[in-house]
Image (spheres, grey):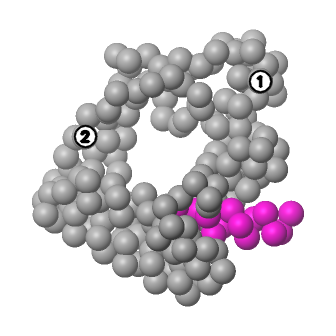
Amino acid sequence: MSRAILMVPCRGRLKAIAPGKSGTADLLVGGCFSVRRADMEAVGGFDTGLRGGEEIDLGIRLVRSGVALSVAQDALFRHEIDRGYREFYVQRIRRGQASAVLRTRHGLGLFPDLHTLSWPTRMLARAAQRSALVANAASVALWGVVRLGGVVGSWRMQAFAAGRMSLLLGLRAEALGERAT
């Protein structure tokens, strides 16, 4: 797998955020990766029925079949993160739905279990799981913080708010997906 150089909105332009240190590869994450054709065929390839998390599903199946994942430290790709609220919102919902499928299939979702979160985050996540109004209000407020971080040039502010928004919407969609199955 390669590592991403993130391009994020910052003071009216895109700013490059270099990838941090990477540890061992225990999940295959999207972006850029290569797999031997024989290994890919042996596990059935991508599940095109998923609407998100296809690469993680594939990675779990590859690892379980004995394929070792690794990160090529010098292989980098550029990933632009400059999207509107609606696109980000829909992407997070799909990620939560995919997480529900992955938990059912593999016992592993894309989001942490609630009990592992700090108590304020856990309380907000529970409220968001129970109420679309809470989830949507929190996501709109957090999106405002994402945009403010871009205006003032704070990548950390953007990352924190986008991460919390992703967590709340994803956990809600995952919980709804699990109830539907």
Amino acid type at mark 2: Ile
Residue in the foreground of this view, choosing between 115 and 76:
115
Amino acid type at mark 1: Arg
Answer whether residue 27 is magenta in the image. Answer: no
Residue 52 visible in the current orientation: no
Q: Quadrant of residue 56?
A: top right
Task: Please state if 10 lies on the left or on the right of 8 as rendered.
Answer: left
Label drawn at residue 64: 1
Task: Please state if 105 lies on the left or on the right of 158 as rendered.
Answer: right
Q: Residue at x 45, y 78 (%)?
A: 138
What x and y, as percent, mark residue 20? 32, 32
Q: In what element is the residue under mark 2?
A: strand
Residue in the foreground of this view, choosing between 84 and 10:
10
Give the labeled residue for mark 2. Answer: 17
Packing grade of label 1 (10 A; few <14, some 14-19, many >=20) is: few
**Which span is picked out in magenta?**
167-181
The C terminus is located in which quarter?
Answer: bottom right
Q: Main secondary structure of the magenta part?
A: helix
As measured in the structure, the alpha-carbon distance from the residue carrying label 1 to the one carrying label 2 is 33 Å
Q: Residue at x 34, y 16 (%)?
A: 74
